[in-house]
Image: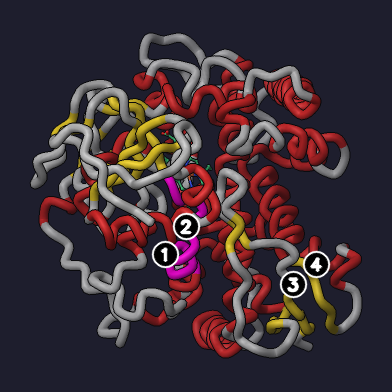
């Protein structure tokens, strides 16, 4: 039972709820995409609901995406929302525990480190991590078997990302202390901690201990590397950050380098490992696509399948499309929040959003809208080929091509796109290219080794778990694998 309650004619319609405070928290939290779809059908692209006592205004569709993600610094604010959650996990003085201008500089350091030369060095690192993982892991002994894929993808993601971004010395520590410490850090990264971040609960104590210990391990490694001088030829993020300086000439302090490295690994870990798991589940559901991927590599690279190089990834368009299409349907970040700093008029409507509201952007809504993606619920990597049956109907306006620099390099000025898995504007992802290279390399290596299918041989798909901060497959999410040779 729902009804529209108008408190102020200039505020968007409010989703009906029975309980104050709780509001729509439960229905939203169980399945955010379904919640957005239902209320959009009822109210249109802009509506408000009560999330943990806070009026939260959703604006969807390309213009809603643009309205929130391209909001001006004087109007919208990310750190006020996220800092309670991220600062205990990452540490002080980075990302959301500093003014936005400092974050922009930090993002610039991160982005500059990710050069073509660096990516050339990362692909062989990622390939060899994947190969040795499948050689050693006990669940991949023999010719075939069944595995819970998210557990495996979580390990493969953290081994590949830590080795490429933090160097081999740090990577070795993931075989001993670091894996368990990151597990403890992770416990601070749950939606319940938006409320309980401060509480002296056992998992928060573990989180705080893990943060201090991981930061110390990084700071000690930085000291060792400084002592080694220039002898280390690796092109990892730690090396770059420890040699960076802010615009005013201050070198980035070691504790900030350490905290940025934690932030980068956490940001990449959940999003990439969830996406990697969904790719494997989609391939298990569509084994013919996996065979097409194998054929694509044989055709483009030769039947002997030489070691993968960075340049090879561009020769594998279907491999790229598998990542792109999976992010369309399974973007790990379903809700992006901003505090409202000034009353904001929503263009094309009579609505004015007051400062008492939080804004919520959900680019996944337009990414699954039949207006832009024919047969939107169908996982069809071929839709990204020219003239495909299900090709997106997006007409890129010239405004979308315009670029702007928020302080960390040029990004698209317009955010009025229906497909934004990496966000847009000032807070846009700087890890997009890394994530693509990482995921494309992992998929290409898996395809060389295995065929996968659903355990029951059918084409069902597991549901989505929205209970953690990043959406991911409900576990257990098992697939059958079979060695190719
Ligand atoms: C920001 C998605 C991988 C680092 C973002 C945002 C999204 C996103 C949607 C915008 C958040 C907001 O506006 O509040 C993804 C997805 C990934 C991925 C889907 C993988 C499939 C990575 C990786 C890294 C990374 C691998 C690091 C190497 C960052 C950073 C920000 C960001 C530093 C900026 C946060 C800010 O400015 O507030 N990402 N990301 N991401 N991401 Fe990613």
| Crowd band around label 2 with a 10 angstrom C-alpha radius: few (<14), some (14–19), many (20+) | many
Compared across the picture, whether 381 is left or right of 176 comes to left
| Crowd band around label 4 with a 10 angstrom C-alpha radius: few (<14), some (14–19), many (20+) | some
Q: Which residue is found at the position 11% from the left and 42% from the top?
A: 347
Q: CA distance from mark 4 to mark 2?
A: 26 Å
Q: CA distance from mark 2 to mark 1?
A: 6 Å
Q: CA distance from mark 3 to mark 2?
A: 20 Å
Query: Residue beneath label 4, please?
Result: 134
Disc on the earlier residue, 4 or 2: 4
**Which of the numbered marks, if any, corresponds to residue 478?**
3
In terms of secondary structure, where does tag 3 sit?
Answer: strand
Disc on the earlier residue, 3 or 2: 2
Q: Is residue 337 above or below residue 15?
A: above
Q: Position of residue 9 (x, y in %)?
A: 14, 36
Query: Residue beneath label 1, please?
Result: 328
Q: Is mark 2 within 8 Å of ligand 1?
A: yes
Q: Position of residue 42 (x, y in %)?
A: 27, 59
Q: Which residue is found at the position 78% from the left and 88% from the top?
A: 485
């Amino acid at each position: 039972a729902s009804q529209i309650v108008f408190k102020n004619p200039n505020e968007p319609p409010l989703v009906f709820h029975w309980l104050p405070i709780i509001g729509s928290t439960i229905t939203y939290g169980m399945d955010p995409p379904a919640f957005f779809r239902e209320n959009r059908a009822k109210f249109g692209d802009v509506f408000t609901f009560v999330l943990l006592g806070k009026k939260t205004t959703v604006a969807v569709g390309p213009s809603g995406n643009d309205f929130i993600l391209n909001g001006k610094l004087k109007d919208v604010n990310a750190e006020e929302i996220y800092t309670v959650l991220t600062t205990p996990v990452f540490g002080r003085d980075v990302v959301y525990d500093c003014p936005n201008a400092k974050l922009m500089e930090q993002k610039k350091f991160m982005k500059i480190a990710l050069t073509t030369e660096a990516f050339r060095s990362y692909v062989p690192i990622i390939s060899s991590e994947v190969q040795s993982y499948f050689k050693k892991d006990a669940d991949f002994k023999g010719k075939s078997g069944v595995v819970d894929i998210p557990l495996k993808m979580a390990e493969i993601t953290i081994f590949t990302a830590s080795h490429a971004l933090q160097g081999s010395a740090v990577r070795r520590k993931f075989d001993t202390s670091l894996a368990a410490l990151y597990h403890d850090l992770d416990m601070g990264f749950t939606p319940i901690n938006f409320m309980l971040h401060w509480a002296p609960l056992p998992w928060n104590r573990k989180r705080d201990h893990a943060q201090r210990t991981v930061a110390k391990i990084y700071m000690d490694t930085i000291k060792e590397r400084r002592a080694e001088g220039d002898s280390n030829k690796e092109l990892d993020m730690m090396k770059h950050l420890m040699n960076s300086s802010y615009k005013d000439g201050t070198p980035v302090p070691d504790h900030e380098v350490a905290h940025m490295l934690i932030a980068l690994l956490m940001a990449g870990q959940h999003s990439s490992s969830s996406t990697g798991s969904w790719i494997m589940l989609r391939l298990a559901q569509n084994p013919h696509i996996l065979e097409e991927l194998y054929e694509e590599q044989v055709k483009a690279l030769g039947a002997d399948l030489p070691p993968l190089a960075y340049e090879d990834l561009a020769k594998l368009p279907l491999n790229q499309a598998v990542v792109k299409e999976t992010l369309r349907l399974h973007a790990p970040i379903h809700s992006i929040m901003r505090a409202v700093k000034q009353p904001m008029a929503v263009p094309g409507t009579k609505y004015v959003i007051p400062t008492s509201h939080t804004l919520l952007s959900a680019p996944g809504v337009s990414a699954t809208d039949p207006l832009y993606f024919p047969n939107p619920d169908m996982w069809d990597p071929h839709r990204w080929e020219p003239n495909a049956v299900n090709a997106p109907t997006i007409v890129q306006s010239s405004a979308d091509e315009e670029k702007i620099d928020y302080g960390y390099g040029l990004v698209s000025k317009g955010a009025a796109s229906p497909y934004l898995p990496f966000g847009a504007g000032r807070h846009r992802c700087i890890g997009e290219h890394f994530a693509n290279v990482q995921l494309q390399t992992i998929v290409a290596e898996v395809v060389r080794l295995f065929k996968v299918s659903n355990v029951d041989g059918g084409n069902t798909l597991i549901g989505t778990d929205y209970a953690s901060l990043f959406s991911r497959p409900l576990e257990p999410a098992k697939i059958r694998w079979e060695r190719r040779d």
